[in-house]
Image (cartoon, coloured by chain):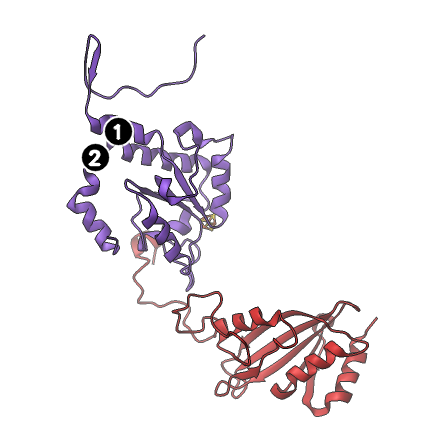
Chain colours: A purple, B red
């Protein structure tokens, strides 16, 4: 029976009779990108849209993210969805600090990206003021398709990231700029 | 059924000159009293044989920056669940002396609402068991709901022109 399930294409490499040689960078990148466990940090309306994204209709399980991790230690992506009040900011940062490398961050919606309509004394004007963000998903709220697109962008980053990136000076400097050791 | 008239007359008889400025916006009995009589009045309404105003619906503050000597108001909304009757009590305070006795001895629910009123308006509830900020970050050094801030600081740079059209 013909199946419609597609299998990830093999990475570039050399193949011959009975062997296939590629680089760890490629293979691990593929493995990581197809099994990104999200930590949903949902604080308001955008979280509702995430529920739709998670559910069977849009189903981010199709991208290997079927397992929302409510422990930061086993999570790969921090998905911040919703308004982050200044009082909540240290908690977001704490969650980020508890995640193991490699970790990615998605800011979903106008609020997480920039404070959104809440241009106010009590709201953090974008989570990139406290933690580095990899992908911003615009919208108020973004539709599930956009969230999936954001996830696919992160997959792309994960697939193409060199294994040494997290040790690079540039990356260390980025963390330094957020006062993260 | 309790009428506004009946409650107002009773309060006038009990508190005399200390209760004034009666109003009935949207049919809600509203009156003003002094700081000294605020808690006795709440207690009186609570323990009153007939009224039994046993529920504190709301407690909040208002800032009137331009009315000298009466810059702040504390507003109590009480509700008699027995009669489904509501009354609103206002107390005006001067900015220089922004103290009022706590209502926590009478209503446990005043604990949260007084902390909130302190958090946003800086009104000091004397005798409150734990008067500190409740919703805002602890490091905040101003009271955000006071009407004394410009709508926007024109020198801010965190929302730049290119992205936010400023
Ligand atoms: S971006 Fe819009 S939908 Fe999302 S949390 Fe903010 S206000 Fe709600």
Q: Quadrant of residue A102?
A: top left
Report helix, strand or loop for mark 1: helix
Res B60 label: none
Pointer 2 chain: A
Report helix, strand or loop for mark 2: loop
Q: Is residue A137 visible?
A: no
Extreme residue in the left direction: A169
Q: Of A55 and A148, which appears nearest the observer?
A: A55
Q: Quadrant of the N terminus of chain B?
A: bottom right
Pinpoint residue A30: horizontal percent, then vertical percent: 29, 27
Q: Quadrant of the C terminus of chain B?
A: bottom left
**Cα distance between the residues tagged 1 and 2:** 8 Å
Q: Residues within 10 Å of mark 1 (few under 14, many from 20)?
A: some
Asked if both marks, 1 and 2, belong to the same chain, the answer given is yes
Extreme residue in the right direction: B1
Pointer 1 chain: A
The residue sitting at 41% across, 71% down in the picture is: B150
Asked whether disc 1 touches disc 2, contact meaning CB atoms under 8 Å apart, the reply is yes
- Identify residue for label 2: A163
The residue sitting at 62% across, 88% down in the picture is: B36
Answer above or below: position of A61 versus B120: above
Extreme residue in the bottom direction: B17
User: Of marks 1 and 2, which one's residue comes earlier in the chain?
Assistant: 1
Q: Residues within 10 Å of mark 2 (few under 14, many from 20)?
A: some
Pinpoint residue A46: horizontal percent, then vertical percent: 47, 45
Pinpoint residue A141: horizontal percent, then vertical percent: 46, 45
- Identify residue for label 1: A28
Instruction: Please give left or right for residue B8 compared with residue A180 in the image.
Output: right
The residue sitting at 50% across, 37% down in the picture is: A52
Q: Is residue B158 visible?
A: yes
């Amino acid at each position: 029976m013909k199946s419609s399930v597609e299998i990830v294409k093999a990475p570039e490499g050399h193949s011959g009779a009975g062997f296939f040689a590629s680089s760890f960078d490629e293979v691990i990148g593929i493995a990581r990108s197809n099994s990104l466990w999200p930590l949903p940090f949902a604080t308001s309306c955008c979280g509702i849209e995430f529920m739709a994204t998670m559910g069977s209709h849009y189903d981010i399980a199709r991208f290997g993210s079927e397992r929302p991790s409510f422990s930061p230690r086993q999570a790969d992506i921090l998905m911040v969805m919703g308004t982050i009040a200044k009082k909540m900011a240290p908690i977001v940062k704490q969650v980020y600090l508890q995640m193991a490398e490699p970790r990615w961050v998605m800011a979903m919606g106008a609020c997480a990206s920039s404070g959104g309509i809440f241009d106010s004394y009590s709201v953090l004007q974008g989570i990139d003021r406290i933690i580095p963000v990899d992908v911003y998903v615009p919208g108020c709220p973004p539709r599930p398709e956009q969230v999936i697109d954001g996830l696919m962008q992160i997959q792309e980053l994960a697939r193409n990231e060199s294994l040494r990136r997290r040790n690079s000076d540039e990356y260390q400097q980025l963390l330094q700029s957020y006062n993260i050791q | 059924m309790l009428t506004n008239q009946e409650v107002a007359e009773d309060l006038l008889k009990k508190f005399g000159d200390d209760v004034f400025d009666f109003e009935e916006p949207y049919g809600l009995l509203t009156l003003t009293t002094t700081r000294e009589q605020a808690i006795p009045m709440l207690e009186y309404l609570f323990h009153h044989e007939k009224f039994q105003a046993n529920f504190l619906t709301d407690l909040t503050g208002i800032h009137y920056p331009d009315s000298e000597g009466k810059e702040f108001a504390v507003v109590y909304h009480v509700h008699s669940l027995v009669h489904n009757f509501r009354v609103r009590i206002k107390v005006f305070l001067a900015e220089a002396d922004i103290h009022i006795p706590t209502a926590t001895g009478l209503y446990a629910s005043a604990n949260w609402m007084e902390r909130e009123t302190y958090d946003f308006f800086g009104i000091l509830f004397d005798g409150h068991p734990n008067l500190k900020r409740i919703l805002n970050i602890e490091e905040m050094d101003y009271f955000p709901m006071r009407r004394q801030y410009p709508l926007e600081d024109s020198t801010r740079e965190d929302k730049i022109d290119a992205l936010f059209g400023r």
